[in-house]
Amino acid sequence: MHIGIIGLPNSSKTTIFNALTGGVAETASFSSGRFAVQHAFVEVPDPRLDALVALFQPPKIARARVEYHDIAGLTRGMGEGGLSGEILGAVAQNDALLHVVRAFDDDEVPHPEIDVDPARDVDLVDTELLLSDLAIVERRIERVRAQMKRPGAKDALAEAEVELALLQRLVAALESETPVRDLDLSSAEEKLIRGFQLLTAKPIMLLLNTGDVDVQDPTSILTYPHRRAELLTIRGQIEMELAQLDAEDRAELLAEYGIREPGLDRVIRHSYRLLGLQSFFTAGEREVHAWTIPVGATALEAAGTIHSDLARGFIRAEVVAWSDLVEAGSFAAARLAGKMRLEGRDYVMRDGDVIEVRFNV
């Protein structure tokens, strides 16, 4: 899972990057004006995997991972005519975007728009993404129209007409300030535009940094009535300090500030929901491994995630809920208790399933 952290300069993006990754990237009161991207992998916290590790005590543990990309700040006017190549590439490579929105005052950190206004800042960044997408779609329309003027087979012309109609629909939406993610697109249409890497088609999480103020309800700051979007608050500086501590000191500080769950855990949980993802596990005395698959994936697809040979030679899958396995104490005990099931290739995986694949190649 790749998540790009975007926002205005001095929006506290790097503070949030450090809070999520435990990093020590330099934060500053003024933007450097240079384009840069910082990268970090984060292991996904999962108490279910921890319980399986405690049960099997394997020498190897493989947690799911998220890669965060802290992208240089976007500014007013950057999207006009399309974002520049390196910025566009840095944003487009991600599965989802995490837009850090400043919702705190600090006289020592100037705001590029003079004053703090979260709703305005969200609209500003959204506009730049819309303008960038509009430039991409309009250029594609020019190419498709040029192709249609050349002699060719009727099938190629028909395909071009279908694409042109979809592109014109996208233009109308973008010009009316409607992100692509809000449109009702068929699976064929989504496939057709996937290669364009449209930024407003990506799922987005708005993370409102409220500074030292504890705000539980983000909608008390702003609303965001768009599809495939999440809205969260975070106390960025406190969370960054928490990320630098060991487990014992972190627990003390969490209690002191009344934080029930670290920001990383909340952000990752909502990221999974935003992207329609879930986890399943393989477990044993040699290794406990967390795997990530889309919600609705089948046992065959889960087997292929582990290794292509398992999918190619798939026979059956033994499946047990992680909690039933932990309660039983072993696979053998779970079988005796009737908690393990034999499932075929079309079984729809559930979040937290533990699976053993029977296969023959």
Image (cartoon, rainbow, N blue to C red):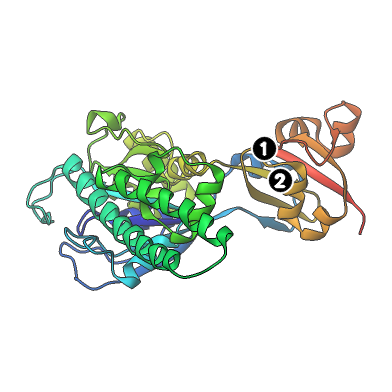
| Cβ–Cβ under 8 Å for marks 1 and 2 | yes
Q: Amino acid at mark 1?
A: Gly
Q: Nearer the viewer, residue 225 or 73?
A: 225
Residue 217 position (above or below residue 360): above
Q: Which residue is mark 1?
A: 352
- Residue 226 falls in which quadrant of the image? top left
Q: Which residue is mark 2?
A: 281
Instruction: Give whichever of discs 1 and 2 has the lower sequence position.
Output: 2
Question: Which residue is depicted at the point 64% across and 39% down?
Answer: 48
Q: Amino acid at mark 2?
A: Phe
**133 left or right, relative to 41:** left
Kindly state the secondary structure of the residue where label 2 is placed: strand
| Image quarter of the C terminus | bottom right
Mark 2 neighbour density, 10 Å: few (under 14) some (14–19) many (20 or more):
many
Q: Nearer the viewer, residue 344 or 289?
A: 344
Horizontal and vertical percent position of residue 202: 42, 50
Can residue 286 be seen here? The reply is yes
Residue 264 position (above or below residue 90): above
